[in-house]
Image (cartoon, helix red, strand yellow):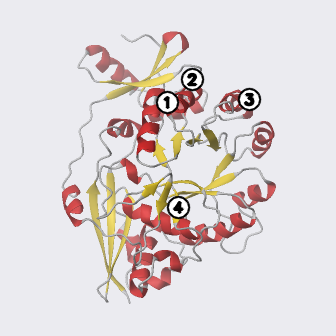
């Protein structure tokens, strides 16, 4: 069996109307590329990736090869999943059979959301719970009061619901992190924090870990180094030292994911799977989770965020677990009608906007965008994680005040600290 052609199908799949504008402000793109791997046997394997199509040079490395050449591969998982789909279909077996021994038929899967206001965060918890999820991973950013946000989520959550916050290092250092994490300790719904401070601050992680009972998660599970190396990988060092209580397997290659799965199993340390995409990627994540012994933290695919998952039969979710597809390969069928529909979807036209950070006392600071506020506040340009702080988007209202401020903000890479004109 040889791969003879790779069909790249560029789509634009809108996020659900409820969250579409927030996702746009967060900088997320609705582009999705579906890959069909055609073979000389007539079988077709499915892969996908958010964003525009990959360069042809990358696709060429698969052309003319046998899908089995990519077993335990080091390539992009987005394309290697198509090879596993083909291998499974060729053998009449589910993809997990080619990854290892099955340890579970249902895989822990969670909801995902970017940073949002306390009221919007609470609303997302309610929607997630209604759809069968019992865990949620949320971005934590300096322009929202994360304690207030957590309390709002706690008030509406079922008693068995859990939330993990991904700080991406936004707490920066121990001095800033300790008082905030101590407040989060008091809120039962908060069950984990990902990278509260920068990962390179090894001593800082030690100190925080001694003071805070909330589990810490590292972003990255790679425990192997290719080629001759006298230095072990960072996750391996942290795993042995006990500096974290779990880690994210985020968009790792099949080789890295499966190898790390066994290393983390030996260390009795849980893994959170994070492979983002529609229902196709969710199927792949389920197969991977079916064989990784400690993939027990609620995984993230964000397939629920799209208005359509691009597969004929949606995934079954029950009390926070997603059923592993039972068919050959990935076990899902592409919805060709949806593909045809979203191949013609035009990009939405959003109005210009200014990100307004409101600090205690009603003081307002103006930024070009949420992304600029995130970057500069992490650098200490503005007060971060202040009690009651929040970010709102001021959309173009046609006024001279908006236009003038928008123009001034785009003349330099700094916020403007003055009252609204």
The percent position of residue 382, horizontal first and vertical second, equals: 57, 23
Q: Tell me the element at label 4.
A: strand
Asked if one can make out residue 37 in the rendered structure from this viewpoint, the answer is yes
Q: Mark 2, residues whose alpha carbon is within 10 Å: few (<14), some, or many (≥20)?
A: some
Q: Tell me the element at label 3.
A: helix
Q: Nearer the viewer, residue 202 or 192?
A: 192
The percent position of residue 20, horizontal first and vertical second, equals: 33, 40
Mark toward the start of the polypeptide (4 vs 1):
4
Q: CA distance from mark 2 to mark 1?
A: 9 Å
Could you tell me if the residues under marks 2 and 1 are in contact, i.e. CB atoms within 8 Å?
A: yes
Which residue is labeled 3 in the image?
A: 175
Could you tell me if the residues under marks 2 and 4 are in contact, i.e. CB atoms within 8 Å?
A: no
Q: In the displayed structure, would residue 21 be above or below residue 234?
A: above
Q: Nearer the viewer, residue 323 or 146?
A: 323
Mark toward the start of the polypeptide (2 vs 4):
4
Q: Tell me the element at label 2.
A: loop
Q: Quadrant of residue 341?
A: bottom left
Q: In the displayed structure, would residue 235 be above or below residue 166?
A: below
Which residue is labeled 1 in the image?
A: 373
In the rendering, which numbered label is found on residue 239?
none
Q: CA distance from mark 2 to mark 3?
A: 16 Å
Mark toward the start of the polypeptide (3 vs 4):
4
Q: Residue at x 68, y 30 (%)?
A: 186
Task: Tell me the quadrant of the picture where the C terminus can be found.
Answer: top left
Mark toward the start of the polypeptide (2 vs 3):
3
Which residue is labeled 2 in the image?
A: 382
Q: Quadrant of residue 270?
A: bottom right
Q: Nearer the viewer, residue 275 or 297?
A: 297
């Amino acid at each position: 069996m040889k791969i003879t052609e790779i069909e790249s199908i560029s789509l634009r799949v809108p996020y659900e109307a409820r969250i579409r504008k927030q996702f746009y402000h967060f900088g997320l793109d609705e582009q999705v590329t579906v890959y069909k791997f055609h073979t000389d046997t007539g079988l077709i394997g499915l892969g996908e990736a958010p964003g525009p199509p990959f360069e042809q040079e990358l696709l060429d490395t698969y052309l003319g090869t046998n899908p089995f050449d990519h077993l335990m591969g080091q390539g992009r998982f987005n394309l290697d999943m198509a090879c596993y789909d083909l291998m499974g279909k060729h053998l009449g077996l589910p993809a997990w059979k080619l990854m290892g021994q099955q340890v579970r038929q249902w895989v822990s899967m969670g909801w995902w959301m970017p940073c949002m206001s306390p009221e919007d965060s609470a609303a997302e918890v309610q929607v997630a719970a209604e759809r069968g999820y019992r865990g949620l991973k949320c971005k934590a950013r300096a322009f929202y009061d994360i304690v207030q946000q957590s309390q709002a989520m706690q008030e509406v959550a079922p008693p068995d619901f859990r939330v993990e916050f991904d700080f991406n290092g936004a707490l920066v250092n121990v001095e800033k992190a300790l008082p905030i994490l101590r407040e989060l300790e008091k809120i039962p719904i908060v069950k984990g924090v990902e990278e509260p401070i920068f990962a390179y601050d090894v001593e800082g992680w030690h100190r925080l870990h001694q003071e805070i009972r909330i589990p810490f998660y590292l972003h990255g599970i790679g425990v192997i180094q290719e080629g001759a190396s006298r230095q072990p990988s960072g996750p391996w060092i942290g795993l042995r030292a006990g500096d974290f209580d779990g880690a994210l397997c985020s968009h790792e290659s099949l080789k890295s994911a499966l190898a790390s799965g066994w290393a983390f199993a030996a260390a009795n340390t849980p893994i959170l799977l994070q492979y983002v995409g529609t229902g196709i990627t969710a199927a792949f994540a389920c197969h991977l989770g079916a064989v990784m012994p400690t993939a027990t933290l609620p995984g993230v695919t964000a397939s629920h965020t799209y208005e359509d998952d691009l597969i004929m039969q949606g995934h079954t979710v029950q009390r926070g677990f997603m059923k592993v597809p039972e068919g050959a390969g990935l076990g899902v069928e592409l919805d060709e009608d949806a593909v045809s529909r979203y191949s013609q979807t035009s990009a939405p036209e959003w109005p210009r906007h200014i990100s307004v950070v409101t600090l205690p006392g009603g003081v307002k600071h103006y930024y070009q965008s949420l992304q600029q506020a995130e970057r500069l506040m992490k650098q200490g340009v503005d007060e971060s994680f202040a009690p009651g702080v929040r970010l709102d988007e001021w959309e173009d209202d046609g006024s001279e005040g908006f236009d003038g401020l928008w123009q001034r903000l785009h003349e330099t890479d700094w916020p403007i600290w003055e009252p609204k004109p």
